[in-house]
Image: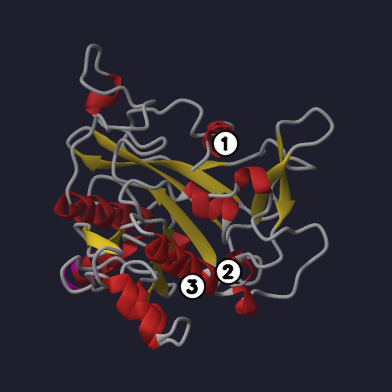
Amino acid sequence: MRPSVCLALAALAATSTSASAPRKSKNTRSPVSSLPGLHPPTPATKTSSGFIDVGNGTHLFYLLVESQSAPATDPLVWWTNGGPGASSLVGAFLENGPYLLTGGGGGSKFNLMSNPYSWNKEANMLYVEFPAGIGFSYCEASSAKGGTCDQSRGDCSPCLASDTSVVDGNLAVIRALLLGDGSSPALFPELAANPVFLAGESYAGVYLPTLAQAILHDEPKVDLRGVWVTDPCTDNAAQSGYLDIGVRFSCDKGLITPELRDTLLAKPCTTGTTQVGDLVRGNSTAACRAAWRLYDIATAGVGDAVHPTAINGLPMYAEESTRI
């Protein structure tokens, strides 16, 4: 992600009431009274944020936006960006949240515009930054002096995490928000009976099925209705060679010819594969360079046909400067 996007998202979250200074209290729920770049600054629908204490000195930051329709009965959709290590505030402000981050004007570094395709038109939307060390979520090592990694860095994390610890932490979030955890009442008891859907992209293909299993096994009171993941990364071995669009997939779908596929798969046009099965390109000959160029032309812009009708003032990526 571009640095300008990271800084803008940080400013957005930092100006919410609860995110301005992480507090080591149990669990918190505070109203978001204003958002920078939004005119007027008060969100149109009730928005809350806070921290969930998931144990071992770890606190996860969340943002919850009420449905514009019927929040008392509309489903609760937990959206997560993948990574692993991507902030779900990217989804909130660049994908399916009520506002989209755009380039600034009139002296402002950035603005927020209403998202006509926001999922909170029909659902209560939950965004959680996890694991600890991502965004505003923190662990005890986040503020340790002389640690091996400062949380402001983008090439490491001060907090240790695994797929198992992520499941445990996210299950604790569900309990804290909807059910209460024994020592603290539920933060959103009004949503406890609402249908719950887990949705996300990329590494959410690991995060969400494992969380769904934990909810079904440990918290049957949660009305979990479904799991949906786009572009899922679920298993490196089973998906080897198909985690990206790929040469074989392109041929299977008629984007390139079998002859071009065979050329690209053979040496010297392919010199090996990555850990997840993607081809390592070989460009040592003119024939290989020409073949890869044909492949790039054939696969450029795939998916343009399914984009919704353009809306005046809503570019495809909100703003070229914020393109991921």
Q: Position of residue 79 (x, y in %)?
A: 44, 61
Query: Is disc 2 placed on a helix, strand or loop?
Result: loop
Q: Hey, which quadrant is residue 222 in on the image?
A: bottom left
Which amino acid, by three-letter code, is at mark 1? Ser
Residue beneath disc 3: 75
Q: Point out the tag, 1 or 2, that comes first from the N-terminus.
A: 1
Q: Point out the tag, 2 or 3, that comes first from the N-terminus.
A: 3
Residue beneath disc 2: 301
Q: Hey, which quadrant is residue 157 in on the image?
A: top left
Query: Main SS type for the magenta part?
Result: helix
In 3D space, how far apart are the residues under numbered discs 1 and 2 (Cα atoms)?
37 Å
Q: Position of residue 91 (x, y in %)?
A: 51, 55
Q: Callout 1: 10 Å neighbours few (<14), some, many (20+)?
A: many
Residue beneath disc 1: 16
- Whether pointer 1 and pointer 2 mark residues with C-beta atoms closer than 8 Å, the reply is no
Query: Is disc 1 placed on a helix, strand or loop?
Result: loop
Q: Nearer the viewer, mark 1 or mark 2?
A: 2
Which amino acid, by three-letter code, is at mark 3? Pro
Q: Hey, which quadrant is residue 53 in on the image?
A: top left
Query: Is disc 3 placed on a helix, strand or loop?
Result: loop
Q: Is residue 32 rendered to the left or right of residue 256?
A: right
Q: Nearer the viewer, mark 2 or mark 3?
A: 2
Which amino acid, by three-letter code, is at mark 2? Gly
Which residue is found at the position 51% from the left and 61% from the top?
125
